[in-house]
Image (spheres, helix red, strand yellow):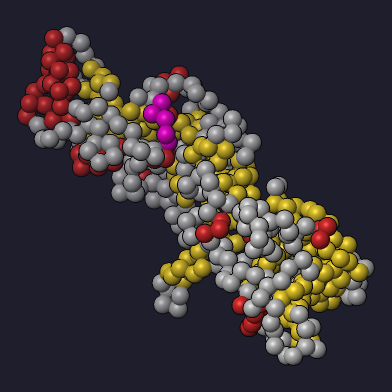
Amino acid sequence: MNINIKRTGLAALIAFAVLSSMVAAPVMAAGGIGWSGDSAAPNPTLNADVTIDEWNGADFSDALQYYDDSGEAAQLPASLNESNDNPITLTATDIDFEQRDEFPRKSDEDGDNAASALDASEWTTSGATVSSTTTAPSVDALNYAGSASSDSATYSNFTVVDGEKGYLTIAADISSASGTPTLQVTDADGDYVEIVLYDSTAAASDDTVLANSTGEGMVLQEQIGDLPVQGGGDGTFDTAEDVTISGDVDADISVLDAERTRELEFGEQLVENDDEELETVTITEPRGAYSVANMDEFDEVMADATIHGLTVDAMFQASDLQDADNVNAEFTQDNDYPQWDALGQFDYRIKLPTAFDLSYADTEFVDDPTLPGERYKTVELAEGVGDTEFSEIDSWTDVTSSYGSAEVTLDSTVSSGTTYAVSYDLVLTNGEVSTIESAAGGGAGPMSSGNGGPIDFLLSLPGIILSGITGLVGVKIFGGGS
């Protein structure tokens, strides 16, 4: 805690002693400064869509974590965009999870399966080709490539008793297709059920069509017993024994299963119902990139999944800053504004972090004033300041005239790694000061005391007497290189 006494002498030392006895040590709230929306403190924000190359559920607990350049788990100094109900975007075929390639499940095996429907060597082909590929780094997949309606490939290294109870699950990237290529599951006596892998004339809601356009992350899950039975058997679907892909399609398949007796859950979305209220919907058949509300509600088999290319709608706010050196806040009484209890002076240093695993899009630096424009006496911006002490920055640009009642765009072309500094002088009430102090201290307030904070003290009779002796007293709640 730094308390700046503007005049020296015995009286100043007395004032210092009195104030020091009243002021608690400053505390940076966990997760950042923590100034909430009802605080009058300025909260400039870098908005960005952040793409995390490799998000790992085994190591991370929220969407805003990533691996830094030393390979350690790190936390972005940011918050999810509160105005976006579903701020996290991903693609199903870019998810690598433990049981993704474990069909068929051999009952006599321990540990990893010796067989997998994603193993190209276990398929037989007629006209088509099958090969090993990936849909994302480390997400092994099966590529089927057929160029005619008569082309096909068959996988038969499995037997599923009570096959009608299983869910036919496929997740695939469709690179090209023509006609209506299909996937069939056939039982022991020749009956089969069928889904269509591609049909450009199908509706998006068609339960038996994987895709009506090319693209990534197409998922279909249907219980085999709910699909129409075709073929020359006894007319009922019994023991499943092979899977056949037929037709003109180039598809990379990251999930293929005909045995699991439930659907996989690919997260939850918040959607608005007919009453204009938000309700939660579980996602089982995403098509292409899709968005979720959080990272908590994925299927249990995806608890430790690695998700490649996870994109987060993030807000890098001043209130999220983790390092006290990047924040400087000081309250003083200023005779230029006698009708106000305090002049708040705030300095912030803020940037988009850089790392090999991070990339950014749709970036902008904005500020949404919470006070009337006339209360912002001075606002200055500097770009590319690095870790320069606030007091030594000489490239300030005055942007005070931009502050009114609307959001201010400070920079619309933000680059990662560019450090911005923003400096504010604004007039405050005593209550606003107390709210800022309390929020910054995580509840108790780094400047508060049992009978009021230092601003309260300065406005009391003893405070007036002392301030008359010592002159203007400034109290700093964060040390940030000023």
Instruction: Residue 112: give x, y in percent of width and height.
Output: 66, 53
Start and end of the magenta stretch? 321-325
The residue at 46%/31% (across/down) is 349
Residue 308 left/right relative to 271: right
Q: 5 or 362: which is nearer to us?
A: 362
Q: 351 or 26: which is nearer to us?
A: 26
The residue at 52%/54% (across/down) is 303
The residue at 71%/47% (across/down) is 137
Question: Taking 265 as reference, is 440 above or below it?
Answer: above
Residue at the far front in the pictured view: 108
Q: 298 or 203: which is nearer to us?
A: 298
In which quadrant is the N terminus drawn? Answer: top left
Residue 275: quarter of image: bottom left
Is 323 included in the stretch rendered in magenta? yes
Q: How many marks?
A: 0
Residue 360: quarter of image: top right
